[in-house]
C-alpha cells in the first residue's frame, strides 16, 4: 500500500469518472445471489445480506472483512454483529470475507475522506456504493490503521446485523400475520408474545433473504447493548492453543513442492548470472531458477531447498546504492534539512508567526533527533503457497490485503483478476508487512514456471534483508520561551512524512506560534507501513522535545503538558489518569526514573508512564502505566491486550531496533543481530480504559505503540540526566551521565 492522501483519494475518484463529485448510479443493494457461491454454498445456508449467513440449525455466521493477525478483529466484529442481530453468541461462527470487490473497504475510504458525512436515507445506497466502487478500483481491502472496529465494525457490520434482524422480523410478521413491532428477538429466536408464536432464525432465514434490504436500519443505543462492551472470550484462541488453527505456513496442497529464495542484497539490483553446480547435485533438488529479481531452489522439502540455495554463487547488477551506508543516508537527510533552512520544505502547519516569536523569545532551545530503519520481524516467516494453471491461480497465505494482492498477482501473471483466488489464513503477525504483494507475486511466478504447486518460504535472513522498512528519519526542533518560561514558539522540520499526515502536528498543545515542515529525501530501501506508521517516529520526536522544553523552563514534564492541554479536557483526563496510576511526583529509589508521554492518534488517546531502573549495566523498564480513551471499548479485554502488545512491540524497537546499511545492503540477518524483547525484560504493564464517547470509536491496534519510546527515554533522563536523541537506546553508553 503506497502513500495516499485525501487529495490522492479524491483525485482517483475524479479520474474514475467523478464518483465522489457528482455521485454514481451504483447501489450496493443486496448482492447475495452473486456472493452465495463464495460464502454460503452449504445445504440450506442462506445469505441474508453480505455479512450474515444463517444455517437451518440456527448457526449464524458473521462474514468479516478483515484479517485476523492476533489483534482479535474477527471476534470483536462478530461480537458487534451478533449484538445488533440479537444472535446467540454460542452459535456464532466466523468466516473471513473473500477478496472480492463486494467486500472492498468502502468504510476505510469513507472514514478517510468523509468521516462525518451524513446523507438522507434515499441517497445512502448511492453514496456508499460510490465509496465501495472507489475502494474496489484502488484495491483497498486491507487490515491496518486501526480501521477494523471503528470503520467496518461501526458501519457495515453493525448495520448488517441490525438489517438482518429487521429482515427476519419482517419475514416472521408476514408468516404469522402480525405487526412487526410486536415481535421480539433474543438468542437467535423470534417471539410474538400475544399469539404465542415463536421460531428460530434458521427457520426464517430463507424468507428473510427475500425481504428488501433496509437502507439505514436503526442500531442499538448503548443502554441496549448485550454483547458490545463486554470482555467476551475470543473465538480464535482455542484453535491457536490446541494447534488446529491454520496459518499460511501450515497449508498443504496435494503435489506441492517447496521453494527457498534469495534476492540481491542491494534492493533494486537484479540477478545477472548464477553458478549452481553444487546445488544441482544435492538431494531432493528439483529445479533451480533465476527469476531476474531473485534466485529460487525448488526441492521436495524446504530445508533441502534452503541448503542448496546457500551454495549458489550469484552475480548482481551494479546500482547507484552500492556505496551507500547508514551514515551517508543520514548525511543526505542533514543536507536536505540544511538546504531547506528557515523557510524551505513543504509546510504542514503554519499557525501564528513562529519565526518572529522565536526572534523575540527570552530563551530558545534546539535539538535534533534520529530514528533508524526498522524491520517488521513477524514471528511467522513470510510465505505463500501458489498453484497456477492456464486459466486459474490459487493462493494460500496470510495477507492484510487480499483484494489488492489478487489484483497485483493477476497483473504479474497476465491473467484476468477473476481468475485469481485467495484463501486467506491466520497471520502470524502482520504489523503492516503482510499488506504488500511481493511474496505472493514471487510464489505465483514460481508456481507458473515450475508447473506444479509451490510453497515458498522466506528464511529469517531473507525476511530481515528484504523487508518494507519503517523509514529512518531526522527531525530538528527549536522552541522559544518567554521570560516566564512559557512556550510561545515551536519550529520543527523533519524528513519524510507518509501516513498519517497529522503525526508530527501538535494541534492538541496550546502553542500560539507553530511552524512544522518536511523535506522529502529519496531512499533506496523499500519503505512501508510499520505499526502506528509515522506516529512511531514522530511521537518520539515530539514528546521527547516537549520534555526538553519542560527541563529548560524549569517545569515538571507533567505540569507542562497539563498547561498546554488546558483546553483539551478529554486528553487531559487521559494524561492525568496515567500520572495518577504511576503516583507521579512520588519518590523513586536512586538510579530510577519516571517518564511520561501522551499521543492522540487513530481516533484514540493514549498516555503512558514508564519506570526505568538504571542501576544495572543497561536500562531495565520495570513498569508501564497506560491509560487510553478509545471512545468506547467494544471488548475491554481486547483493547487491553492491544495496548500490552503495542508496548511490547514499541519497547523492542526503542531498546534494540536498528536496521543499518553497508555497501547498499542491510547488515542485519536474524534475531542475534536484530534482537527482540525477552521475557525477563518484559515490564509489568497496567492498563486503564476510559470510555469517553460511545459514538466515536477509536482504534486499538496502532495507538498504544507511539508513547512508549518517549516515555522510556524521558524516564532515562529523569534517572541519569542523559538525554537520548538517537534510537535505539542500546547504542548508548550509560556508564556515566551527560546531557
Image (cartoon, rainbow, N blue to C red):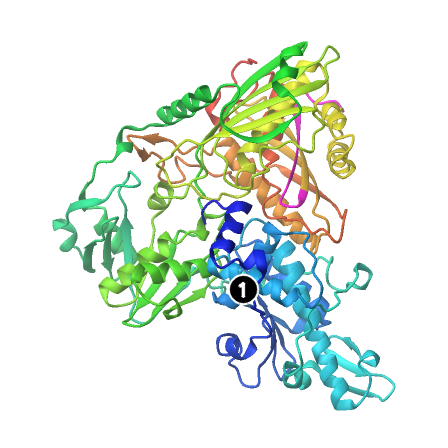
Q: What residue sits 82% from the left and 84% below the top?
A: 179
Q: Which corner quadrant of the image does residue 578 belong to?
A: top right
- The magenta span reads 586-604
Give whichever of 356, 550 is nearer the camera.
356
588 in magenta: yes
On screen, residue 6 above or below 479: below
Residue 602's quadrant in the figure?
A: top right
Would you say 324 lies left or right of 93 here? left
Q: Depth check: 738 or 351 in front?
A: 351
Residue at the extreme left: 277
683, 502: nearer the viewer: 502
Is residue 229 highlighted in magenta? no
Quarter of the image that includes the C terminus = top right
Mark 1, other Cα within 10 Å: few <14 / some 14–19 / many ≥20: few
For disc 1, the marked residue is: 239
Is residue 649 visible to the viewer in this orientation of the structure? yes
> Horizontal and vertical percent for residue 545?
61, 23
Comparing 82 with 219, the one in front is 219
Q: Quadrant of residue 173?
A: bottom right
x, y (%) of residue 469? 42, 40
Task: Report the label total.
Answer: 1
Q: Position of residue 733 (x, y in %)?
A: 49, 19
Q: Residue at x 43, y 22 (%)?
A: 334
Taking the image as drawn, is residue 234 in sight?
Answer: no
Residue positioned most to the right = 194
Of helix, strand and loop, which one carries label 1?
Answer: helix
Task: Please provide percent x and percent y for residue 44.
Answer: 57, 86
Q: Residue at x 61, y 33 (%)?
A: 505
**Depicted 196 relative to depicted 531: above or below:** below
In the image: residue 613, left or right of residue 186: left
Amino acid at each position: 500500500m503506497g502513500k495516499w492522501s485525501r487529495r490522492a483519494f479524491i483525485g482517483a475518484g475524479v479520474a474514475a469518472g467523478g464518483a465522489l463529485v457528482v455521485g454514481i448510479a451504483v447501489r450496493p443493494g443486496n448482492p447475495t445471489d452473486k456472493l452465495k457461491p463464495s460464502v454460503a454454498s452449504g445445504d440450506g445456508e442462506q445469505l441474508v445480506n453480505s455479512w450474515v449467513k444463517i444455517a437451518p440449525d440456527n448457526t449464524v455466521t458473521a462474514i468479516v472483512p478483515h484479517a485476523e493477525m492476533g489483534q482479535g478483529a474477527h471476534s470483536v466484529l462478530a461480537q458487534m454483529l451478533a449484538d445488533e442481530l440479537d444472535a446467540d453468541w454460542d452459535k456464532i461462527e466466523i468466516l473471513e470475507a473473500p477478496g472480492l470487490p463486494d467486500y472492498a473497504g468502502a468504510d476505510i475510504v469513507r472514514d478517510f475522506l468523509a468521516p462525518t458525512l451524513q446523507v438522507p436515507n434515499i441517497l445512502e445506497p448511492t453514496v456508499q456504493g460510490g465509496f465501495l466502487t472507489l475502494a474496489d478500483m484502488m484495491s483497498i481491502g486491507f487490515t491496518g490503521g486501526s480501521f477494523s472496529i471503528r470503520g467496518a465494525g461501526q458501519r457495515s457490520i453493525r448495520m448488517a446485523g441490525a438489517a438482518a434482524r429487521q429482515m427476519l422480523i419482517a419475514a416472521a410478521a408476514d408468516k404469522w400475520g402480525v405487526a412487526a413491532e410486536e415481535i421480539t428477538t433474543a438468542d437467535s429466536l423470534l417471539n410474538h408474545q400475544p399469539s404465542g408464536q415463536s421460531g428460530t432464525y434458521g427457520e426464517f432465514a430463507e424468507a428473510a433473504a427475500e425481504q428488501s434490504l433496509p437502507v439505514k436500519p436503526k442500531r442499538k443505543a448503548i443502554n441496549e447493548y448485550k454483547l458490545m462492551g463486554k470482555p467476551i472470550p475470543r473465538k480464535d484462541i482455542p484453535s491457536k492453543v490446541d494447534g488446529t488453527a491454520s496459518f499460511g505456513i501450515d497449508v498443504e496442497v496435494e503435489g506441492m513442492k517447496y521453494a527457498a529464495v534469495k534476492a540481491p542484497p542491494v534492493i533494486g539490483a537484479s540477478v545477472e548470472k548464477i553458478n549452481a553446480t553444487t546445488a544441482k547435485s544435492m538431494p531432493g533438488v528439483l529445479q533451480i531458477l533465476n527469476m531476474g529479481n531473485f534466485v529460487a531452489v525448488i526441492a521436495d522439502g524446504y530445508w533441502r531447498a534452503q541448503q542448496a540455495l546457500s551454495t549458489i554463487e550469484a552475480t548482481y547488477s551494479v546500482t547507484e546504492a552500492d556505496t551507500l551506508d547508514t551514515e551517508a543516508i543520514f548525511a543526505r537527510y542533514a543536507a536536505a534539512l540544511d538546504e531547506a533552512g528557515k523557510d524551505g520544505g513543504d509546510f504542514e502547519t503554519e499557525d501564528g508567526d513562529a519565526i518572529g516569536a522565536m526572534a523575540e523569545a527570552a530563551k530558545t532551545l534546539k535539538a535534533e533527533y534520529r530514528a533508524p530503519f526498522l524491520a517488521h520481524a513477524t514471528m511467522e516467516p513470510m510465505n505463500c503457497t501458489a498453484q497456477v494453471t492456464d486459466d486459474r491461480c490459487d493462493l494460500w497465505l496470510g495477507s492484510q490485503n487480499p483484494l489488492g494482492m489478487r489484483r497485483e498477482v493477476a497483473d504479474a501473471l497476465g491473467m484476468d483478476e477473476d481468475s485469481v483466488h485467495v484463501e486467506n489464513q491466520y497471520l502470524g503477525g502482520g504489523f503492516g508487512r503482510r499488506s504488500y504483494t511481493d511474496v505472493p507475486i514471487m510464489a505465483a511466478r514460481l508456481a507458473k514456471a515450475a508447473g506444479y504447486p509451490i510453497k515458498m518460504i522466506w528464511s529469517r535472513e531473507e525476511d530481515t534483508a528484504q523487508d518494507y522498512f519503517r523509514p529512518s528519519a531526522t527531525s530538528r526542533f527549536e522552541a522559544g520561551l518567554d521570560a516566564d518560561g512559557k512556550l510561545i514558539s515551536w519550529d520543527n522540520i523533519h524528513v519524510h512524512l507518509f501516513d498519517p499526515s497529522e503525526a508530527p502536528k501538535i494541534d492538541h498543545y496550546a502553542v500560539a506560534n507553530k511552524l512544522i515542515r518536511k523535506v522529502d529525501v529519496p531512499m533506496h530501501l523499500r519503505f512501508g507501513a510499520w505499526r502506528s506508521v509515522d506516529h512511531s517516529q514522530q511521537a518520539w520526536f515530539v514528546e521527547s522535545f516537549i520534555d526538553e522544553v519542560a527541563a529548560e523552563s524549569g517545569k515538571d514534564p507533567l505540569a507542562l503538558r497539563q498547561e498546554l492541554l488546558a483546553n483539551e479536557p478529554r486528553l487531559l483526563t487521559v494524561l492525568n489518569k496515567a500520572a495518577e496510576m504511576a503516583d507521579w511526583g512520588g519518590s523513586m529509589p536512586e538510579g530510577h526514573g519516571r517518564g511520561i508521554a501522551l499521543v492522540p492518534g487513530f481516533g484514540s488517546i493514549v498516555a503512558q508512564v514508564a519506570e526505568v531502573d538504571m542501576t544495572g549495566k543497561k536500562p531495565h523498564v520495570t513498569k508501564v502505566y497506560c491509560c487510553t480513551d478509545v471512545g468506547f471499548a467494544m471488548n475491554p479485554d481486547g483493547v487491553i491486550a492491544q495496548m500490552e502488545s503495542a508496548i511490547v512491540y514499541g519497547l523492542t524497537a526503542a531498546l534494540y531496533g536498528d536496521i543499518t546499511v553497508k555497501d547498499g545492503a542491510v547488515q542485519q540477518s536474524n534475531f542475534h543481530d536484530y534482537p527482540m524483547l525477552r521475557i525477563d525484560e518484559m515490564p509489568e504493564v497496567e492498563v486503564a480504559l476510559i470510555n469517553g464517547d460511545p459514538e466515536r470509536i477509536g482504534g486499538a491496534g496502532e495507538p498504544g505503540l507511539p508513547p512508549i519510546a518517549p516515555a522510556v527515554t524521558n524516564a532515562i533522563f529523569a534517572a541519569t540526566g542523559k538525554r537520548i536523541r538517537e534510537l535505539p537506546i542500546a547504542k548508548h553508553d550509560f556508564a556515566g551521565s551527560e546531557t
